[in-house]
Image (tube, rainbow, N blue to C red):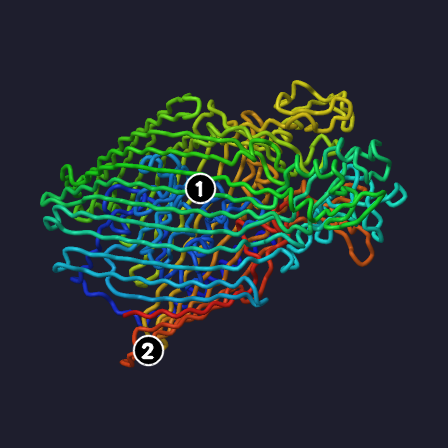
Amino acid sequence: MRPGCARLWASAALSVLATTVAFAQPAVETAKKDETVTLERYVVTGSLLPKTEGETFIPVTIYSSLKLLQMGAATPIEGLRSLPSFFGATNTELDSNGGSGTATVNLRGLGGTLTLINGRRAGANANSGFTDLNVIPIDAIQTIDILKDGAGSVYGADALAGVVNVVLKKKWIGTQVRAGYGISSEGDARQWDTSVAIGRAFNDNKGYVTVVASYSDKDTLYARDRQLSGNADGRPFGGLNGGSPTFAGHIGSAGGGLILNSNLDFGRAPADYHAFNPSTESYNFRELSPSIPGQIRKLVHFATGYELFGRRLESYAEFDWGNQFTANGLAPAPFALNSTAARNSVYNPWGQGNTVPGNTVRYRGTDTGNRLTEFDKTDYRAVLGIKGEFDNGWAYDSAYMKSHEIRTLTEKNGVFNSAINAAVTAGQFNPFARAGSTGTFNGHSWDNHAALTAALASGKKPIDDTLESYDLKLFGPAMTLPAGPVNVALGYEWRYTHSTFNPDAVYFAGDLLGYNSSNPFDASSNNNAFYGEVSVPLISPANAVPFIRELSITGNIRYDVAKVRDNLTQAGRSFGSDTKRVGLRYQPLADVVLRATYGTGFRVPSLAQLYAAPGDGFPTLIDPLRFPIGQQTDVLAQGNPDLDPETSVSKGLGVIYSPHAVPGLNFTVDYYRTKLGGLITDGAQFILNQNAATQGPGFVYGNPATINPNALYADRIHRNPLTGELDDQTGPAIDSTNLNVSERLAEGIDYSVSYRQPKNDWGQLTHTLEFNQVLKWELVPEVGSPARDYKGHFVDPASDAIAPGSIPEWKGFYNLLWEKGPWTVSFTMNYINRIQDDPNAQLTDANGHYAYLDTATGNLVPTDDISMERYVTFDVTATYAFKTDNKWLRGTEIRVGVQNIGNEPPPFSAGAFNDNYDTSLYNIRGRYFQFGVTRKF
């Protein structure tokens, strides 16, 4: 799509709105001059002071649970993904390899979004507790407030680039039962969900109790069930052949060696093998691997409160509980056998005791089933607090909170290295035979299935995260100026976090093939913070100043001191930081509001980033020095106690136009600029890339003698001095210990137009058009190095840890809501602009030109297009509410919907780690039908 097409599309939609406004004018009634509307004040996300929605200094988007359901969302995260500012890599329940079922929010691709529940932290860290929005029942949600600005001066560490505050139902009165079902047009990806909500008031409305319980069950979708994800060979689309060289019958290196002739069950002599052609004979692991893991969720929300002394003293309590089971997995475990055991096998086709070609025998137990990675986590959150208001306008709120998560990863169908090698030595396992085969040769018998089954292993990796906090907030008018009261808020927060990781001994024994090694970890932190906010009205309408209807300023300041400790070594350190924000709100006319903000933020390194124990990983890497490299490389990952905090500086400027001549019409434009510094990373690919970029002019590709020993991170990379290849034979080839590196800069504009037409005989229409435009998105890998431009680009963090994922130049939606009597119909058009794919992951021809494989001719066809195509989808949801006295239908609503009406698959991405598409931005499910019924009593 041409760069101007998105703007043209937006202009067309605006024209439709403008035309609608024009035709709607006769229906508008002029408000009476003496008519006064009083708006309720409440604490808006991003502030400590009660305000009306129109008085905010910062941009806040609010979604209700009804809005989420009208969008066809079965979970909160499904609805939030439509946000124009929701892009960049993040945890998603759509991930297979590496996915845990957790789903979190990333605003503007910056990775600095803090998640709250009722204004308090949702979990012990960015991936724990109720930061996973999937474990919050959608029917328990009152609203979700999305603050697209840094708020470190209000909430402390982690609120670098935005805040998501989930406001749960409290004084909700009634009874509701809801059930839903979804299924794709392919007949798979089925999902069931049901919920019950009960709310009651008691003792003359002095007290209330609200309970919401829900259950959902989602089927696994396998990679083979979609054309896009079904094959690891991406060459027909312009990607690389990601097929695996590790399978039964393959001997030698990843890029060469020999494989067993197809007509044989096992090798008897060297003549039984032929040269391995990785282009056509690699193993397609996608035939068996999941694409979207299945999940079962059981969730409960409870809230209660009681006025002990009227509004002066009210006690309240909240309790949330959730259990989520995610059934993920990988293709059957690949492994290379111990060279000594394979050489001495009685079945060695080159003769017992003789070295096999490449000194490597590869195998994959396709007969014993997939590696299973099951995530079972239980979360609870409890809050006990008091709040009240005094006659002088002052109020207070104080509460103790505890949040706890126990998350257990169970990995099954790995292989004990020692056990399988012992079976090879004993002749019970023939490493030169196909998976699952049995036979007799030279007087010895083997049963590969039985031997491998006996060597299978499983292990558990339990993670325990605890968050405790206490907070006290006081707010009210400090003094009165001619323009109005000066409101002040003061507060204190204590926060304690504790994280432990205790993997089974099998992981740190280094004997488990098919899974990464791990070691125990135990750390804690103690944080104390003092903060304040002031809002000063300078001019109000009562002052009658020309062209200054209203002018006010606000300021926030917060000081945090965090003490962290490794509980295994007793080592520790402290972090201190002050953060601030100032804001200006200027209303020159009744229809126009201008606002501006400036703020700072910081994020203390997580406990895992500081103190995680050493462990091995085996990522797929690209060697930028162009020496041969295997499919996977042993990499050391561990914490770094010397890390510095990440920091942020945010600037914003916005305008709101709400013409009184057209009630219900609102235009909002917000410019933002956020810079993050000291980014923490642990990426092996990043280390390789930076090392290559600083080799200097003396380096010659393919010549190991010219490798610069003084290049950046040379001390973290171990290469074979004779071949130049990454060498992990005696230990990890790369030390990927956490380090502070780069800075990120995001600059852009959020556009929003909404118009709620007056009612007429045809009902009422509400138009909403929202877009985000990225003006600049840059990353500086190292201080002094040139900035990389990521605007309109995609690089998967699995390939380069500091990469942001997809940064679309334009992303947005248009929604049309029609309401008439019992009917409500919501129609949405979603748009994501064209994105350039990772150039390092593309197929090239002999001339170094981008190409794709023509499967009909087997030839490479040159191409200049390596982009992920623009993505446009359409959704519709219709709800009918029975308005009748019939006792069976009274209070019943029926909802039907279709997401992705056109069944558009995600655009192919050669650089994507999972399933050939960016799972953070798209969904491979395809056209999806939804049915639901709600009964209110």
Image location (x, y in percent) of residue 707: 72, 22
Q: Is residue 754 above or below residue 624?
A: below
Query: If the image is split into quadrants, where does the C terminus sit?
Result: bottom left
Quarter of image, res 431: top right
Q: Is residue 340 above or below residue 900?
A: above
Q: Residue at x 41, y 70 (%)?
A: 895
> Contact, CB < 8 Å: mark 1 with mark 2?
no
**In the figure, is residue 717 to the left or right of 661?**
right
Quarter of image, res 857: bottom right
Image location (x, y in percent) of residue 525: 37, 29
Q: Residue at x 45, y 25 (%)?
A: 644
**Residue picked out by circle 2:** 889
Q: Nearer the viewer, residue 627 or 299?
A: 299
Q: Residue at x 40, y 45 (%)?
A: 131
**In the figure, is residue 491 to the left or right of 756?**
left
Tag 2's secondary structure?
Answer: loop
**What's the amino acid at mark 2?**
Leu
Image location (x, y in percent) of residue 11: 49, 59
Which residue is the extreme one toward the right? 271
**Residue picked out by circle 1:** 127
